[in-house]
Amino acid sequence: MKAFTNVKDLGNLGVAVKEALEVKQNRFAYKSLGENKTLLMVFFNSSLRTRLSTQKAAFNLGMNTMVLDINQGAWRLETERGVIMDGDKTEHILEAIPVMGSYCDIIGVRSFARFESKEDDYNEKILNQFIQYAGKPVFSMEGATTHPLQAFADLITIEEFKKKERPKVVLTWAPHPRVLPQAVPNSFADFMNEADVDFVITHPEGYELDPQFVRNAKVVYNQDEALKNADFVYAKNWSPFNDNNYGKILSKDTSWTIDTKKMSLTNTAFFMHCLPVRRNVIVTDDVIESPQSIVVQEAANREISCQVVLKRMLESLSCK
Ligand code: AN0
Ligand code: CP
């Protein structure tokens, strides 16, 4: 595996989930695979789970890790080619990337949507430059449009908790005070469309996601209707994808917050969220503290999803 940015990079998803469950059973079985191999994690944005779970996954595989926070202690990076660099940016990303690549064997990159240009965001301008110029395998730790390590962990969690062969999984929009990317819902849809689940997306009008991720998923605009008989409720805020409202907030409708009344419409569904979550905005205290809430188990599976990706990347390095 040379790059990991979406579900397709995992190949057969059933095989990948099986591998994940095996890794979870014995996470130190491949301790020698990463010996003398170095992982560099590059963060353009904040993180708690990704920062810790990715390092833990690397340690399980015997790797060394280095973490660079671009906005804390690194030189300010210019990302546009052709700019006369007489302003506040000291270094160009076109030198920085191959230099970073020269110190490591695998690179993870977190670079959120900037909402300055939809075209740049949806072309994954930053992440793709790493893939192109690092000379090393690159995986997304949440790019501008996808968060595949999260969605893979979400799928592993659903596999572990499901009580029927084909559960109903509902991705629901919920309100939030700030403009958030579509990366988490895009990847969740990307993975759920490939998994053996009955997948439904619900959101207010104007919050339609990119069709390349929605594909044939059922979209229901009435949240109560969508939640009926759900086995898993996956809440997340995102901002509009459509050109006219990209980077704006159209709704802060608190009737979309997940509370016990909403959960009572479901088939005693499990509650999921990628975290961090704003309590009593996205979900009430009662719901997130209930026994049906599996947000912590979901976050714990980030170690496992990442370990599968790192393991596969290390295996393809040693095939060289
Ligand atoms: C980010 C997002 O919505 O993409 C990261 C989630 C994992 N969330 C926030 O910025 C709050
Ligand atoms: N879910 C997730 O990616 O969390 P962090 O932003 O804390 O890494």
Image (cartoon, rainbow, N blue to C red):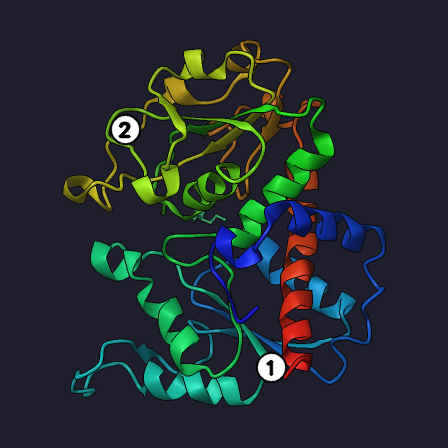
Residue depicted at x 52% and y 59%: 9
Q: Identify the residue position indicated by label 2 in the image.
A: 251
**Number of the front mark, 2 or 1:** 1
Q: Is residue 123 above or below residue 156?
A: below
Identified by mark 2, the residue type is Ser
Residue depicted at x 48% and y 59%: 46
Q: Position of residue 298 (x, y in %)?
A: 65, 41
Q: Which quadrant is the N terminus positioned in?
A: bottom right
Q: Identify the residue position indicated by label 1 in the image.
A: 105
In this image, 302 relative to 190: left or right?
Answer: right
Q: Secondary structure at mark 2?
A: loop
Q: Position of residue 250 (x, y in %)?
A: 23, 32
Q: Which of the pair 299/187 is nearer the observer? A: 187
Q: Which of the pair 248/311 is nearer the observer? A: 311
Q: Earlier in the sequence, mark 2 or mark 1?
A: 1
Callout 2–callout 1 Cβ contact below 8 Å: no
Q: Which of the pair 136/46 is nearer the observer? A: 136
Identified by mark 1, the residue type is Asp
Q: Secondary structure at mark 1?
A: loop
Residue depicted at x 32% and y 23%: 253
In this image, 107 relative to 62: left or right?
Answer: left
Q: Residue 91: in sight, yes or no?
A: yes
Q: Is residue 41 above or below residue 293?
A: below
Q: Is residue 184 above or below residue 39?
A: above
From mark 2 to mark 1, how far is it between C-alphas? 44 Å
